[in-house]
Image (cartoon, coloured by chain):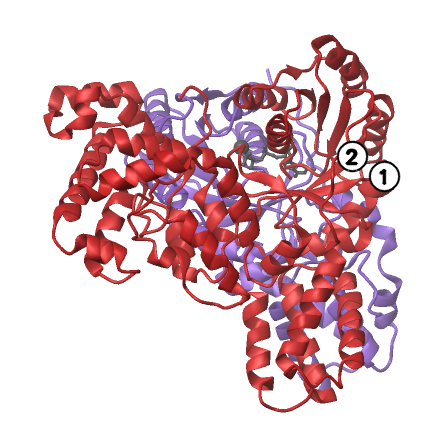
Amino acid sequence: MLPELAEPPRLRDRMGRTRDRLSGYLRGIRSRGAIGEEDWESIEAALLGADVGVATTTALLQDLRQRVRDGGLRDGDALMSALRQDLCDSLTSAGGAELQFVPGATNVWLFVGVNGVGKTTTIGKVARRQVEEGRSVLLAAGDTFRAAAAEQLGMWAARAEVDVVRGAEGGDPSAVVFDAVQRAAARGNDLVLADTAGRLHTKVNLVEELKKIRRVADRPPGTVTEVLLVLDATTGQNGLIQAQQFLQAVGVTGVVLTKLDGTAKGGIVVAIQRELGLPVKLVGIGEGADDLVPFDAEQFVDALFEDAPIAG
Amino acid sequence: MFESLSERLEGIFGRLRGRGRLSDADLDEALAEIRSALLEADVNLAVVRSFIDGIRAALVGEELSRSLSPGQQVIKAVNQQLIRVLGGEPLRIVHASVPPTVVLLAGLQGSGKTTTSAKLARWFRQQGRQPLLVGADLQRPAAVEQLRVLGRQAEVPVFSEATDPVAVAGAARGEAQRLGRDVVIVDTAGRLTIDAALMDEVRRVSEVVRPDYTFLVIDAMTGQDAVATAEAFHTTLDLDGVILTKLDGDARGGAALSVKGVVGRPIAFASTGERLADFDQFHPDRMANRILGMGDMLSLIEQAEREFDRDVATQGASRLLEGRFTLQDFLAQLQQVKKLGSIGGLLSLLPGVPKELKQANAVVDDRDVARVEAIIRSMTPAERDDPTIVDGARRLRIARGSGTSTQDVNQLLRQFRDAQQLMRSPGMLAGMLGGGGGARGARAARALAGMTGELEGVGGAGGFDLGELGSGMGSLGGVPAARSSAKGGKGKKKKGGRVTPKGGH
Ligand SMILES: Nc1nc2c(ncn2[C@@H]2O[C@H](COP(=O)(O)OP(=O)(O)OP(=O)(O)O)[C@@H](O)[C@H]2O)c(=O)[nH]1
Ligand SMILES: [Mg+2]
C-alpha cells in the first residue's frame, strides 16, 4: 500500500521562501506616475538576473517602451502589469501543462537532458503521481552508463511501488527500453517511464543513441506520447541551446524545470517557449516524492521578480 | 545560437579597425557589446558591471597609446581583465604536515560532486598520493553505490556507513589513518543554499572532518545564480577554491568569472568529460581564452603529454602507412585514447577549431568507443588479424561476448573493411598527408573514424599528430585558423576515438 500522498505542495509555497523580499525597487515602480530610465534598468536587471537572457529581455523591453511611448501604458502600475502579462502570455502560448496519454495504449514517456539535472528523480516523482492517478506504471532503466544509475532508479521504483526493467550495465539502452515496452504490453502496464543517461547535447553520438531509443520506444506496441526535457533551474543561457538540440534530435514535447525550490529562477524557459514553442509542463520543487507540481505561469512569473537584483 | 565572446569582440573590432584611436562613442559601443557578450556567457550581472568598469578604466588610461589599434587595445584590456578576475597562479595543493590532507567537496544537487570526488582521487593518485574516498552523501538514492563503483575505477578505497553524514565524516580521518591513506576526499550530498538545515549539516561535517581544502563544485552551465550559490557556500564553509564541471559542453562558462569575482578564491580544478581522466588543474589564463573562444591549448598539450604513449601511436601509424593495420592495432590505439581522456574534451580546448569540426568531433564519444572495444575484445587473435573469417556463427559469438548486437559487429567490420580499402587505394596517402586536402583522404579518415562514430577526420583513426599540434600552438595567438584537426588526415600517428572508463575492460 502506498503511503497517503500529501496534498500537492503549491509552487508558490515552495518557491516563495524568499517571497517577502520582493525587490522593493520593483514594487516601487508600481506606484510610480512616470516611468524613468532607472525603472527600465531595474526591470532589465530583474529579467537578466533571472536568466531570461539578453535577447529575450531586450525584445520584451523594446515592445514595452514602444507601448509607453504610444501612450498605451501610462504609469508604473500599468507597465508592471503589462510586463507580467507579456511573460505569462509567452509562457502559455506553447500550450498547457497537461501530459499526453493515450488510453489503452502502451504509452512511453521519455526523460532526456544533460547530466545531473534531475531526470531520474523526476521519474520517481512522476511514477508516484501517475500511480495515484490510477495508471499502471513500469520504469525503464535506460541509463546503462552512469555508475549506480539503475540502483538509483530502483530505489525510486520501490518508493512508488512499481517495477523497473533493467539491462546490463554498459549495455544498449534502447534494448532496455524495448524490453520494457514489450513487458509493459504483455503485463498490461499502460505507461512506461524511460530514464536515459545524462548527455550533453554537443555529443553527437550520444544524441544519435537517444534518437535510437526514441525510435525503438515508438515501435508498436509502444507509443511515445511525451518526450520531456529535464532542465535544471540554475541553467543559464546554455539551456536554450540544450532545448534546441534535444528538440531537433528527439522531438521534445515539453520541459520539466527542476530545482525551482532553490534560489535560481529558471528564466531561460521564457526564451525556450518564445523561441522554440516548448511548454513547461512540470516543475520540480524538492527531492521528495511529492515535490513535483504542474507548471503555473503566473506563479512562475511572480517568483521571477522576487528578490530581484537592483539596477546600479 | 550565441556567438562566442571572441566572435562578438571580433565583430566590434572589425568595425573599429582603421579608424584611428578609440573615441568615446567607440568605447561605449564596444563596452555595450562586451556587456551583452558577457551576459550571454552567463557572467553574473553584478560581476559584469564591475568588469566593464574595470575595462573602461583600463582603456581610458590607455587612450593615448599609439602602438595599438583600437581593436587591439580593447581585446588586450578585456583579456587582461578576464585574467585578473579569474585569478593569477593556479592553486597549489600544500599537503598537511600530519597526514591525511582532507578535501571536502560541497555544492548544489547535480553539480557533479560524486564524479568529481573520484576524479580528484585519481588526480591525487597520479601525484603519488594514496587517497581515501568518503561517501557522506546519504541523501540521494544510490549515491554511495555510485561512489563505490567510481572508487573501483580509480582504484581508490571508499569509506561510508549508513549512519549520518556527520558521523561518517567524523570517522573519516581515523579510517584514513587505519588504512594508511594520506589524502581524504569527502563527497557530500547536494544541497540548496536556502535549506538552512542542510547548510548547517554541511557546516558540522566540515567541523568534524576539519578539511585542509574545501571546494565548491559548480556546473559550468550555471547562470546568474552562480553568485548567490557561491556566496552562500563561502559564508558557511569558508571555501578554498572552486571546481568547475561539465566544461566539455558548449556553455561559455561565465559562471567561472562570476564565482571568482564574488568569492575571490581560485578556481582550482576543471572537469571536461565523463571519464575520470577528464580532469585537471585550472589555469586562469587559459580559461580567459576559453571564455573568449580562443581555446585552452596549453591544457591540451599537457594532458596529452602526460597520458600519451608515443611509441604505441607511432607503431600504429606506421602499420597504417604500410597497409597492415589490423583490428588489433586499432584496439591498441583505442587504449591510447582511453588514457588521453575524451577527445571531445580535448578538442573543445583547441583554439580556432571551426564549429563544424567541433560538432564532428563531438561525434566520437566514450560509449561508442566502449562498444567498439568490447567487440574487438570478443574476437580471437585470428579474427582481429583477418576479419574476413568472421562468419555468421562467429559474429553471433562476438555479439554475445561483447553485449552488442550482430548489427553492431557487422557495422564495425564493414567500416573497417571500407577504411582498409580506401587506405590501399592510390592517392589516399597523399590525401591524408597532404594537409587536409584530398577528398579521398578525408573519406578514408572518415571511414576509419566511423568505427567509433561518424567523426570526420578528427581524433579518429584518421588521427591527429600531437607533435605537430604542439608545435603549431605557438602560432595560435588568437588566430582563428582552422588548423590542427581540420587537417587531421595525417597518418603518422593515430588513435581511435574515445573510450569509456567503464570497469571490466
Ligand atoms: N532541490 C531539488 N533537488 C532536486 C530536484 N530534482 C532533482 N534534484 C536532485 O538533483 C540531483 C540529481 O538528480 P538526478 O535525478 O540524479 O539527476 P539525473 O538527471 O538523473 O542525473 P544523471 O542521470 O546523472 O544525468 C539529486 O541530488 C536530486 O535529488 C528538485 O526539484 N529540487
Ligand atoms: Mg539519472
Frontmost residue, B462 versus A229 = B462
Q: Which residue is farthest top?
A: B178
Frontmost residue, B159 versus B68 = B68
Residue at image location 52% in from the left, 52% down from the top:
B349
Secondary structure, mark 1, is loop
Residue A238 coordinates in the image, percent (x, y) = 57, 55
Q: Answer with left or right where residue A309 lies relative to residue B242.
A: right
Residue B344 coordinates in the image, percent (x, y) = 45, 46
Q: CA distance from mark 2 to mark 1?
A: 7 Å
Q: Which residue is farthest bottom?
A: B19
Q: Residue B214 bears which disc, if any?
A: 2
Q: Which residue is mark 1?
A: B238
Does the residue at mark 2 contact the one at mark 1 (Cβ under 8 Å)? Answer: yes
Looking at the rendered structure, whether the residues under marks 2 and 1 are on a common chain is answered as: yes
Residue at image location 23% in from the left, 38% down from the top:
B319
Q: Answer with left or right where residue B9 lies relative to residue A72.
A: left
| Residue A108 in sight in this render | no
Chain where mark 2 sits: B
Amino acid beneath label 1: Asp
Instruction: Identify the image quadrant of the C terminus of chain B.
Output: top left
Amino acid beneath label 2: Thr
The chain coloured purple is A
| Residue B268 in sight in this render | yes
Image hue for chain B? red
Residue A221 coordinates in the image, percent (x, y) = 29, 33
Frontmost residue, B444 versus A3 = B444
Residue at image location 75% in from the left, 39% down from the top:
B192
Tell me which corner region of the image, top left, top right, bottom left or bottom right, holds residue B436. Answer: bottom left
Q: Is residue B34 above or below residue A3?
A: below
Circle 1 packing at 10 Å, graded few (<14), some (14-19), many (20+), is some
Tell me which corner region of the image, top left, top right, bottom left or bottom right, holds residue A35. Answer: bottom right
